[in-house]
Structure formats: C-alpha cells, structure tokens
Amino acid sequence: MNLNIAHLFPDLLNLYGDRGNIQSLVMRSRWRGIDVSLREYTLDDPIDFSRADIILLGGGSDREQQIVCGRLKSIRDEFHGYVEDGGTVLAICGGYQLLGHYYETSEGKMEGLSLVDLYTVQKSPRLISNVVMENEDFPCEIVGFENHGGRTYIGNNRPFGSRILYGNGNNGEDGTEGILYKNVIGTYLHGPLLPKNPHVCDRLLQSALERKYGKADLSPLDDRLEMQANRYIVGRFVQKKS
Ligand code: GLN
C-alpha cells in the first residue's frame, strides 16, 4: 500500500510548524508498513489531482493568502472534483479560510475555492489561544493553538470541534471549531495539529486508504508520548470534572 501526499504551496502557507502535520502523516504510515511519497508544490507547478491521496493546505498571513488566492482559481474545478470524489484534505487556518467562498479583510475580499459552504470575515481582536475541544466522532479531546483575525461561519455544516472546552474556535460566538465535509478537515488549529492528536491523523490516513484500496485496517501504534502531550494540554486548560 502507498499514499501520495501533496503539500500545496508550503513556501507561502506554513505557519507555526504546520509542516509537523506532514511528518505525522508520513511516520504513522511508515510505522505501519505503508509507503508514502511526499510532493511539495510551489505556485507555478502543475498539480496532478488524480495522483493525490491526501492534500495539505497550511496557514498563512493575509498577504500570503492573497498571493495564493489567484492561483486557486485556476485549480478550482479539479480541486472540487477531488473533494466531491472523497479525496482527503487537511486545511489549516489560512488554508481553511480559502476552502470557503471568501475571506473579507479591511483590504478587500479574497475569493476562495468555494469547495465548502463557509465564509470568513476579519474582525478585531485577533483570536489567540490554546484550544481544547470535543467531537463525538473522535475518541478523545482534540487540542491545538489558534491565532486568527478571521471569523468563519459554517452555517449548517458539521463542525470539526462540536464543543469547545477552551478557546474561541470558528468565530468566538457559536461554540464551533473548523469543519468536517466529506473527507475534508478544515480547522484553525495549528500547533501543529496532528502530532498531539494521533486520532485525527489516523482518521485522515483511514479515509485516504479507504478511498484508494476500499478498506483500511490501521494497526494500533504505541501512542503513549503523543497522548501524554494531548492530556497535558487538556489538563492545563480544562477543569477536571470531579
Ligand atoms: N490570515 C488569516 C487570519 O488572520 C489566517 C492566519 C493563519 O493562518 N494563522 O485570520
């Protein structure tokens, strides 16, 4: 078995160690005997969506997002086809915002990919915090770090974090964080996300393998260190229930 990971525009969208997400995907595959090939795409590279099993879009500043924005238009249709066909995507912060219809800032409106029905509007102050959240589809809390000026509104879509135990999430108002759409995870969580949330990493691997091979039996790994990091953040920011 093998997986092809496509990292889009890492020279522009790579904040707060987003690259660590790739390392988690690669190592958790290799530890299970699954081959991984990683391809990084810069802005002018042609992207072969038919070859990709997992696509990663990282976070970026408003300026970097603006640069990427123009390029996204030219790959929109193929990217849309990939998502609707069940392709796996992890989009973080700036990348997450660009999955939606637009990101409106004081400088103007950046057009997104419209792959997912959401939009983002910049407001003050920036939302900067550690985050602890739950989702009944995941076996334990998801932890991370957020730093964004944009407020994202996901309508009736499924959030990635359905209950925020600490932090702000999508907009600081509706108690949701990120989005789950088909095999797409969009989220504000940096940190990076996957090393401290092996259950999230495995969900991405699972969906990519199932799409490619029809099934995926991910053997369990020794996650003691990863879970120690996860539990530390939960214990630090969330009051223990007695
Ligand atoms: N520029 C976006 C915002 O401030 C995204 C920032 C990020 O990727 N951390 O909302």
Image (cartoon, helix red, strand yellow):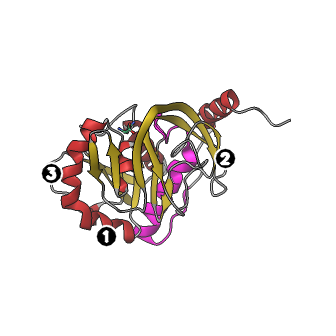
Q: Which mark is residue 45?
A: 3
> Looking at the picture, which amino acid does disc 2 mark?
Cys
Q: Determine whether label 1 and label 2 are within 8 Å by CB.
A: no
SS assignment at label 2: loop
Where on the image, by quarter, is ligand 1?
top left
Q: Residue furthest top?
A: 236
Frontmost residue, 55 versus 126: 126
| Residue 62 rendering spot, x and y as whole percentages | 30, 38
Q: CA distance from mark 1 to mark 3?
A: 19 Å
Residue 24, given in percent of the width and then of the height, sits at 45, 42
Image quarter where the C terminus lies is: top right
Q: In the image, what residue occupies the spot 52% across and 52% down?
A: 202
Secondary structure type for disc 1: helix
Q: Is residue 57 visible?
A: no
Q: Classify residue 201 as left or right of residue 11.
A: right
The disc, 2 or 3, on the residue closer to the chain's N-terminal end is 3
Magenta-colored span: 189-218
- Three-letter code, disc 3: Asp
Of all residues, the one furthest to the right in this rendering is 242
The label nearer to you, 1 versus 2, is: 1
**Which residue, given by chain and number where applicable, does mark 2 sit on?**
140
Report if residue 184 lies within the magenta region: no
Q: Is residue 194 left or right of 9 when viewed as pictured?
A: right
In the rendered structure, which disc, 1 or 3, sits on the residue that comes first in sequence?
Answer: 3
> Which numbered disc, 1 or 2, marks the residue that appears first in the sequence?
1
Q: Which residue is mark 1?
A: 81
Q: Name which residue lies at 30% across and 55% down.
A: 112
The answer to whether mark 2 and mark 3 are in CB contact below 8 A is no
- In this rendering, the answer to whether 148 lies above or below 76 is above
Question: Marks 1 and 2, how far apart in space?
Answer: 32 Å
